[in-house]
Amino acid sequence: MSERRTQMLEAAVRVIAQDGVRGLRVEKLAAEAGVSTALIYYHFKDRAGILRAALEHVNHRAQTYTGEVTSDDPRTQVEQMLLAELQDTDVVRETSVAWGELRASAAFHPELRATLLSTTEAWNADVETLVRQANPDLDAAAAAERLTALVEGLSERWHSGSLTLGRARELLAGAVERELG
């Protein structure tokens, strides 16, 4: 990916995290990225193209911090990978809020659904692999689906002020313990 395209996608994530998907305007995105609106349209064609690319970019951003597991134990890896989604850092907060916005907007923007499905399936598959290694007797696919859905719900509650970060992390750690036995 070109440096300029990455710059525009980083700006798109920032704007979506600040103003929501409905607040994403090409003019504001161009100003945030320091480029012309023509360049935005050249790279993404239309607003739907911006949203699809932003969703893919958010997924790649999340992989940079969820892949930083420090244990050889699959059970600990599952917990570390999922808890990485609940950190009080700028990049995690911004990525998480943008992901939630893009996920919610897929109800109104069907063109996002295929990208959302593939990114969700990839995340579930990563978690499923670790769950299967941690406990081969479990239905690893179902456990992974429950855990990733829980992360998304806890994240939304944390970002909306309905739950503290500490409580969200505590609930997630407890769920991992219960799921993996």
Image: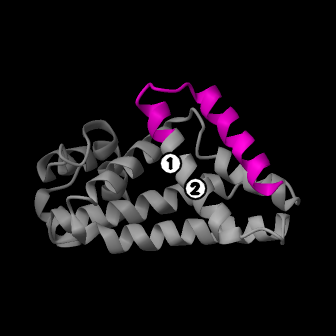
Q: Are marks 2 and 1 in contact (CB under 8 Å)?
A: yes
Callout 1: few (<14), some (14-19), or many (20+) C-alpha neighbours within 10 Å?
A: some
- What residue is drawn where x is 62% and y is 72%? 125
* Kind of element beneath mark 2: helix
Percent position of residue 177, x then y: 79, 47
Name the kind of residue labelled 1 in the image: Glu
The quadrant in which the N terminus is found is bottom left
Residue at 37% over, 61% down: 55
Per the image, the residue denoted by label 1 is 152
Q: Quadrant of residue 109?
A: bottom left
Residue 69 found in image quarter:
bottom right
Tell me if I can see residue 3 in this picture. no
User: Residue 8's x, y, as percent?
Assistant: 30, 57
Q: Is residue 178 above or below residue 54?
A: above
- Report the number of numbered marks: 2
Q: Which residues are magenta?
A: 155-181
Nearer the observer, 128 or 180 = 180
Per the model, the C-alpha gap separating discs 2 and 1 is 6 Å
Is 172 left, or right, of 33 in this rendering?
A: right
Judged from this view, the residue extending furthest toward the right is 73
* Mark 2, other Cα within 10 Å: few <14 / some 14–19 / many ≥20: some
User: Does the magenta portion include 169?
Assistant: yes
**Location of mark 2 (residue):** 148
Dot 1: element: helix
Where's residue 121, x and y in %?
52, 71
The amino acid beneath tag 2 is Thr
Instruction: Give 83 or 176, whichever is nearer the viewer.
Output: 176
Instruction: Measuring from the top left, give residue 34's x and y in whole percent.
Output: 24, 49
Side of 138 relative to 81 (left or right): right
Residue 37 falls in image quadrant: bottom left
Question: Can you say whether 172 is above or below 99 in the image?
Answer: above
